[in-house]
């Protein structure tokens, strides 16, 4: 499935890079969509870059931008405390679900937990304060109409479709995308705007980049990059791995968004084939786009 790109779709791509990417995904048992850009030279590469994909936890990056906007506009305060409840607790990544109900945490700490350890419960608490529709309004303001936060993160005992659903979640074309939908191209655009200081404010953009640099899941883009700084946010579902981020290479800042879907097996180990491929593709993109 990874090789389902026609020659016409590949026209205009850097030939050497295009060949290297397709060699890397040859035989991969899934679908690969990606976009990348050297933010210094302007060189780009895409493989189905405008394909709408499930975001998994990479939607937490747009959520974070919306919170920063709300604080900037004095519609929220970093110091305001939100209360942990059993209804907010979500399975999957994070630590807050292990804490006692009634614990109160500042909004700033919840946003950091949402990104740094991809805490799903922190995400639900944040979305209680800054709802998905507010996130989507911020994406519209940034010119990213395909990037939609659809709902909160539901456990087995909840109806996912009704759990904090946005207006976008009710549209037929968004059925089946889970908590969020975007495209690799739009994720790279968002990363570029952050790096340029054009999201909320220069200071807010810089702070968000620093939070992304502290993100602890580095098994995808950041897997084999040595001492290169990486500002990233990863995502995982049973049959999907994704990663979006900026790599600060010596020859340029490379913004990358990669989604590997339709993985045949459920594997949450660091050596999931999707993660291994994302790492290989990131290395190739950095080497070729930084030339």
Image (cartoon, helix red, strand yellow):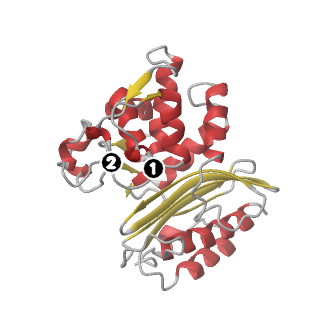
Quadrant that contains the C terminus: bottom right
Mark identifier at residue 189: none
In what element is the residue under mark 2?
A: loop
The residue at the point 60 percent across, 74 percent down is: 21
Left or right? Give the position of 282 relative to 239.
Answer: right
Q: Which residue is mark 2?
A: 90
Circle 1: element type: loop
Left or right of 78? Residue 86 is left
Give the percent coordinates (x, y) of residue 148. 36, 42
Residue drawn at x 69%, y 48% as measured from the top left? 39
- Quarter placement of the N terminus: bottom left
Q: Residue at x 74, y 67 (%)?
A: 287
Residue 107 x/y as whole percent: 47, 27
Q: Nearer the viewer, residue 130 or 11?
A: 130
Q: Could you say which is closer to the camera, residue 271 or residue 255?
A: 271
Q: Position of residue 190 (x, y in %)?
A: 54, 42
Give the class, few, some or many, for how many residues have Cα within 10 Å of label 1's Cα (few <14, many ≥20). Answer: many
Q: Alpha carbon of mark 1 to alpha carbon of mark 2: how far?
A: 9 Å
Looking at the image, which residue sits at the far right? 250
Task: Tell me, yes or no, whether the two marked residues, 1 and 2, touch with CB atoms within 8 Å.
Answer: yes
């Amino acid at each position: 499935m990874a090789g389902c790109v026609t020659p016409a779709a590949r026209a205009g791509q850097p030939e050497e890079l295009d060949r290297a990417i397709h060699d890397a995904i040859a035989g991969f048992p899934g679908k690969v969509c990606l976009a990348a850009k050297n933010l210094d030279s302007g060189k780009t590469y895409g493989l189905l870059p405008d394909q709408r994909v499930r975001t998994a936890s990479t939607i937490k990056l747009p959520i974070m931008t919306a919170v920063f906007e709300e604080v900037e506009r004095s519609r929220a305060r970093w110091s305001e405390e939100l209360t942990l409840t059993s209804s907010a607790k979500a399975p999957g990544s994070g630590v807050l679900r292990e804490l006692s109900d009634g614990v109160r945490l500042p909004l700033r700490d919840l946003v950091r937990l949402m990104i740094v350890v991809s805490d799903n419960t922190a995400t639900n608490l944040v979305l209680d304060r800054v709802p998905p529709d507010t996130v989507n309004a911020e994406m519209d303001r940034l010119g990213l109409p395909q990037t939609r936060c659809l709902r909160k993160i539901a456990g087995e005992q909840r109806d996912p479709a009704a759990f904090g659903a946005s207006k976008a979640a009710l549209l037929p074309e968004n059925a089946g995308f889970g908590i969020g939908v975007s495209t690799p191209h739009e994720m790279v655009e968002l990363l570029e705007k952050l790096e340029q200081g054009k999201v909320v404010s220069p200071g807010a953009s810089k702070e968000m980049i620093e939070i992304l640099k502290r993100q602890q899941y580095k098994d995808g883009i950041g897997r084999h990059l040595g001492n290169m700084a990486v500002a990233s946010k990863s995502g995982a579902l049973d049959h999907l791995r994704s990663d979006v981020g900026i790599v600060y290479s010596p020859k340029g800042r490379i913004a990358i968004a990669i989604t590997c879907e339709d993985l045949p097996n459920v594997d949450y180990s660091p050596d999931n084939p999707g993660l291994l491929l994302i790492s290989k593709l990131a290395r190739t993109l950095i080497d070729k786009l930084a030339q």
